[in-house]
Amino acid sequence: MTLESIEGRSDRLSNNITNGVIDFIAGSLGGVALVYVGQPLDTVKVKMQTFPSVYKGMVDCFIKTLKTDGVVRGLYAGTAPAIVANVAENSVLFAAYGGCQKVVANVLGIEKVEDLSSLGNACAGFFAAFFSSLTLCPTELIKCKLQAMREVQSQTDKANKIMTQIGPWNLTKSILREQGIRGFFTGLSSTIAREMPGYFFFFGGYEVTREFLAEPNQKRDDIGWQKTMVAGAVGGTILWLVIFPADVVKSRIQVQNLKTPALVVMKDIVREEGIGALYNGLKPTLIRTIPATATLFVTYEYSENCLLKILLYTVPTLSGVYFTVNFVHITTRGAADGHLDSDADAARINVPFNCCGYFDVR
């Protein structure tokens, strides 16, 4: 094996790890932004899904929760585990999404991930969601239980008018003590059944919308933050319209600690409450998902771009070259004498010759 081929493999490995870390960090920041924008209506959604007979509708649920428990303990109940859940889900999701894009591109014989079609990106999202489900299930279990705790207590102990407040850490210890590690994965099958098809449509809808909004000869990544927000909102709306019945089933299994299989729970809901019960809480979900998902994608895309620019300006490559460029990926060595004298030299670091600046070989 030649020295050049070894260096090439090392550079590719370094780039894959770096891109994975960037996707992970950008996804984490997007998850935090999503929670703070959408948590109040997410609380309303969970309450309406699990206890539909308690509330007349979205506004009634919102007002009663606000009056009874206030903003922090009511509408923002479960925020800490929600942040953990969304950071865990979105960091793993976007990191796995980047990896799955490469796999799909290799299978289809496509050289660059950027050239994947919307269908290819949708397939990458489908497979990436399996990995994010494993991190999402335990944290979302805690979140949902905290959000519907007052309703659970009022139904299990109607004689006691005083509601016991319990935090995420004490609830976690209680589940671990009573059910063990397996207790945190209650509803895992329904979570996977919700996430994988959901993110197929999520990323597919997002990419199709970006293509639609792009000007002729304009790349999807260059459409601007306003159009990126629109694409994110479309992707989130499609996701929830597709997966909402599975989300209702998952919420009931987790909040009510059911051991019944997900399909049986769904059949019971339809038989006893009607098919409309599978869409309880859809209205606050759709209202929430437009700003929340738009914020997620804008935060992710622009965090990723900022991290790449910081990396390009400050971090040395494996071969010891420091570089200054305006944008995009640099992966390998520059010219042997430390200057970019031709397009051929520029091609070796994968940037256009006319956007390269100072090049310093240490």
Image (tube, rainbow, N blue to C red):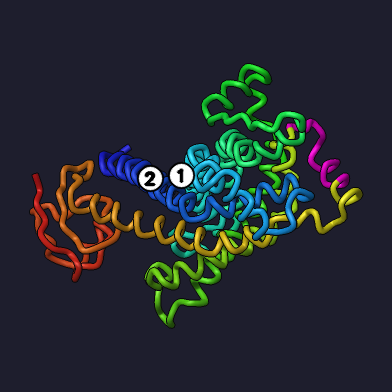
Tell me the quarter of the picture where residue 262 sits: top right
Residue in view at x 58 percent, y 49 percent: 67
Helix, strand or loop at label 1? It is helix
Helix, strand or loop at label 2? It is helix
Tell me the quarter of the picture where residue 324 sits: bottom left
The reply, left or right, for residue 73 in relation to residue 263 is left
Residue type, label 1: Ser
Q: Is residue 135 visible?
A: yes
- Which residue matches tag 2? 25
Residue nearest the observer in this picture, 183 or 222: 183
Assign the C terminus to one quadrant of the image: top left
The answer to which of marks 1 and 2 sits earlier in the sequence is 2
The reply, left or right, for residue 241 in relation to residue 334 is right
Answer few, some or many: residues within 10 Å of disc 1's Cα (few below 14, many 20 plus, some between 14 and 19): many
State the extent of the magenta-drawn residues as a range: 257-268
Mark 1–mark 2 CB contact (< 8 Å): yes
